[in-house]
Image (cartoon, rainbow, N blue to C red):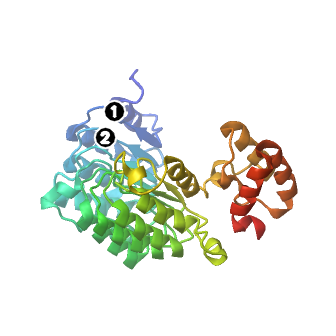
Amino acid sequence: MPNLTWGTIDYYISRLTSPERNPPLRIDICNQNLTDNDATRLADALLHYSNDSSRCGSKLKMLRLRGNNITSTGFLAICEAIGGVADDISALEELDMGNNRVVSNIDDFAFAMYLLFSAAPNLKHLDLTGNRIGLSNGGDMKLIGEILSLNEHYGGRLETLNLSDNFLCDRAVIHLAETMMISEFKSLTRLDLSLNYIGVRGAEALAEVVACNSTLEHLLLRSNSVGDSGAALFASALKTNDTLLELNLGYNGITSVGMKELRTAVYDTTSLNSLVTSNHTVSILFYGYCADNDDFHYRGCTKEQLLEMDQILRINALPKHYPDLPPIPQLKLAFRLRQSFDMKYFHHIDRKHMPEILRFVSAHVGADKLYYIMKEMPLAVCAS
C-alpha cells in the first residue's frame, strides 16, 4: 500500500482496494471538504470484494463523513455501497452524515434511506445533524416520521437518532411524534431535536410521547422555544414516565414559572403521597432557563431559591455520576468538593447508613442545619 496520510479518503480507498484485502471496519473522514465525487469513489471502493468473497462494504461497522459537502447524490452512492446493490447484509452500526447536504434532492434522500435500513438492520446510531431537512422540498414535514417507519419496518434496531439543527419546526416534530406513538420504536433510546425552532405545539406532541413511551431514555431539546407552557406539558408527562433519564430543556425561554412546574414533577413536597409518586428517574438539564435578567424579581423568587430549584431538578443524577461509590464515601466526597450541603446527596441512600450520615452531617453543618435537613429529607430515604 502506498505511503498515504492516515485518515484521508485516499488512505481508506487504498486499504479497501489493496491486494492484501484487509478492509477497515471503521472509516472516519470528517471535515475534509469531501464532494459527491469523493463519496462516489469511496462507494466504489466499498463494493470491492475481500479474500473471503464478501464485499468490503458489508463488513464496515462505522462510517463517519461529518462536516463535508456531500449532497443526496453522494449519499445515495454510499447507501448503495453499504449493501443496497448486493444481497449480503451490512454490519454497519454507526453512520454519521452530520453537517452535509444529503437532502438536496428529497427523492434521492428517501431512496437512500430505504436502501440503508433494508441493507443494514444492525444500524444503531444515525446522525443527520445540520442537513436542513426541514427546508427540503418545500418543507416536506412527514419525511422524518417516514424515516423512522422504515427503520421499524426492517427490524428496527436504531438506538440513537440525532436530528439537531435541521429547521424541523413544530409540524415535522408533530409528525415524528405521531409516528413514535403508533409504532412505539422499542429500540430508540436517544433522540436529539435541539436547535429546531420547536414551540409549544411541538412540545405538546413530544410530551405525549414521553407520557407513553417506555424505551426513550434521553430527549434533548436544547435551544428551542418551548417556553413555560412547554415546560408544564413535560412536567405533566413525567408523572407517568419512569424510563426517561435525561430531559434537556436548556435555552428554551423558560422562566421560573416553568421551572417550578418541572421541580414539582421530580420533587413534589405537597404531601407524602405526591413525594413518593414524584419522578425519581429523570435528570432535567436546565441551563439558560431565565428569559431575562429581571425574571428573579418579577416572579417573586430570589436567585438563591432558583439555584436551589436548579439543584433539585438534578436530584436524580447523582447515582449516575458516581454509580460505583457506596453511600458514605459518596456523601463525604460531595462535602469535600462543594464545601456545602446539597439535598440531592441524601437521595437513594439506604436507611441503615443514616446514623453515620447524620453524625457526619451534624459535625459539618451544626444542629440547626441538621434539623432543617431532616425536615426536608426526601421520603425515599426514610422509607428505604
Q: Which residue of the protein is positioned furthest toward the left in this rendering? A: 138
- Locate residue 201, reporting x and y percent: 29, 69
Using the image, determine if residue 364 lies above or below residue 119: above
Label 2, residues with CA under 10 Å away: few <14, some 14-19, many ≥20: many
- Labels 1 & 2 near each other (Cβ < 8 A): yes
**Which quarter of the image is occupied by the C terminus?**
bottom right
Tag 1: Cα neighbours inside 10 Å, few (<14), some, or many (≥20)?
many
> What residue does disc 1 label?
9
Question: Residue 353 occupies which quadrant of the picture?
Answer: bottom right
297, above or below 209, in the image: above
Name the residue nearer the viewer: 111 or 11. Answer: 111
Earlier in the chain: of badge 1 and badge 2, it is 1
Q: Residue drawn at (28%, 71%), measured in percent from left and top?
A: 175
The amino acid type found where label 1 is placed reads Ile
Q: Residue at x 87, y 56 (%)?
A: 355
Viewer-nearest residue: 210 or 305: 305
Numbered mark located on residue 336 in the image: none
Q: Give the secondary structure at mark 2.
A: helix
Examine the rendering and report whether any part of residue 44 can be seen.
yes
Element type at marker 1?
helix
Residue 47 percent across, percent down from the top left: 34, 47
The Cα–Cα distance between marks 1 and 2, rounded to whole angstroms, is: 7 Å
Q: Which mark identifies residue 42?
A: 2
Nearer to us in this view, 156 or 48: 156
Q: Is residue 86 visible?
A: no
| Among the 4 quarters of the image, the one containing residue 37 | top left
Total number of numbered discs in the rendering: 2
Picture quadrant of residue 12: top left
> In this rendering, is residue 178 above or below 292?
below
Q: Amino acid at mark 2?
A: Leu
**Does residue 338 appear to the left or right of 222 in the view shown?**
right
